[in-house]
Amino acid sequence: HGTSRVNDKGHLEIGGVDTVELAKEYGTPLYIYDVALIRARARAFKDAFRRHGVKAQVAYASKAFSSIAMVQLAEEEGLSLDVVSGGELYTAIQAGFPPERIHFHGNNKSREELMMALDHGVGCIVVDNFYELELLEQLGKQYGKTIAVLIRVTPGVEAHTHDYILTGQEDSKFGFDLNNGQAEQALERALSSSSFSVLGIHCHIGSQIFETTGFVLAAQKIFKKIAAWKEAYGFVPAVVNLGGGFGIRYTKEDDPIPVSEYVDQIVSEVKKQVSEQNIAMPEIWIEPGRSLVGDAGTTIYSIGSRKDVPNVRHYVAVDGGMSDNIRPALYEAKYEAVLANRVLDEENEIVSIAGKCCESGDMLIWDLPLPKAKPGDYLAVFCTGAYGYSMANNYNRIPRPAVVFVENGEAQLVVKRETYEDLVRLDLPLKTKVNK
Ligand code: LLP
């Protein structure tokens, strides 16, 4: 997929660059991003809205992968940016991202984080709960500012892959419940305060969703309320943000629909609702993370040790694992992989790919057909671009890998590999040892 192909050496090539050469130059594990594919996905979302002639914003949910270069790429592609912490906001600011296109999310933003957002003039704050409303109201007074907000509601639609659940009252830590009066309470409060300008409504129904049904249902529920709010408060949202969650293909079993399909269904439902409820057409915002960067990322590992359990299993270990990809351990996520240096060799055994962390749960892939792998071979695991680096950690004091962008035959290091010095940089020695 994307610009991936096999070159005449039988090596995996991405963006016109030999991944084996990259592994030799930058070391392993190594995350490689196909920049052209990220651009293509961004354009697919934006073009789909453009075809419908509706006003829209596509915000990249930077929790999927945040780094200065990634934020700059999002900026180049005309995306907006969803940040969920002071750290993601700081990264965006350091990257020179236009603050007015930043949306600040989170269920427990601190006063400091909110002040940081106000100091930088972020485009809007997605208000999640009553505590935050109160904090923001004080800050609005303190700053003498009117704060643009979206009210995050929980519509009682929850979607995961092909399943969606309808619940009267959703048991979720996020947002104001749409079904028990909380959303109204929040809206009334925000509308009656001079600290706020209520830009609109936000909801997010889940992640790795393969069907449009959940989005359509959420839109229906929200617009029904919007009609009532128009009556009650004369409030009509300028923006309706339907969140992210568009699914991608990790393995052959996954069956995603094209990005344009989600947009088509969302736009036609919103248009239908708008005409039925006789309200003005709002801007439609979405905030995809995974579907912008997920399948653009590939991780290259070096193959190391092997353990054969007779008649049971062949364990083949790589030089990373749950420290750079915690998704298999955390969600039983599935991945596909090939030997990057021998892509076309016959797959003549079934192996299970083990990470190098000291726990049995650190397995990257179970039962993978592979050519007989030996030390010195490279394993390429596909679709690691979302929630890979961003959830990477230093468990077992393993330094986090480097990240390389490839495009048009050129490679660019965008995140350096952590060093052992980095690992102890914040450590302080025991007092008694210092005094001696
Ligand atoms: N908007 C909001 C409010 C969200 O909470 C999320 C993801 C997104 C947008 C982007 O969702 P996406 O398009 O990437 O599905 N660590 C998990 C995924 C957690 C998603 C959390 N929220 C994983 O690795 O699968």
Image (cartoon, rainbow, N blue to C red):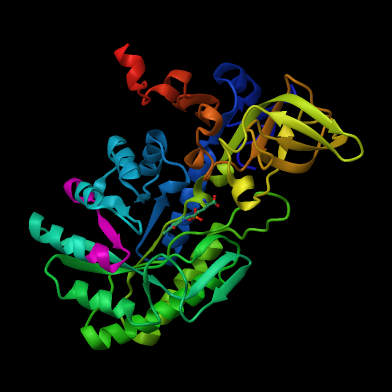
**From which residue to which does the magenta span run?**
117-133
Res 377 quadrant in image: top right
Magenta-colored stretch includes residue 126: yes
Say above or below: 121 vs 30: below
**Does the image show residue 340?**
no
Q: Nearer the viewer, residue 95 or 169?
A: 169
Q: Residue at the location (52% across, 28% down)?
A: 397
Q: Residue at the location (51% across, 78% down)?
A: 167
Image mark count: 0
Say above or below: 305 vs 65: above
Q: List x then y, in percent, for residue 72.
A: 37, 38
Q: List x then y, in percent, for residue 412.
A: 47, 25
Q: Nearer the viewer, residue 186 or 23?
A: 186
Q: List x then y, in percent, for residue 355.
A: 66, 34
Q: Quadrant of the C terminus?
A: top left
Q: Nearer the viewer, residue 84 or 357?
A: 357
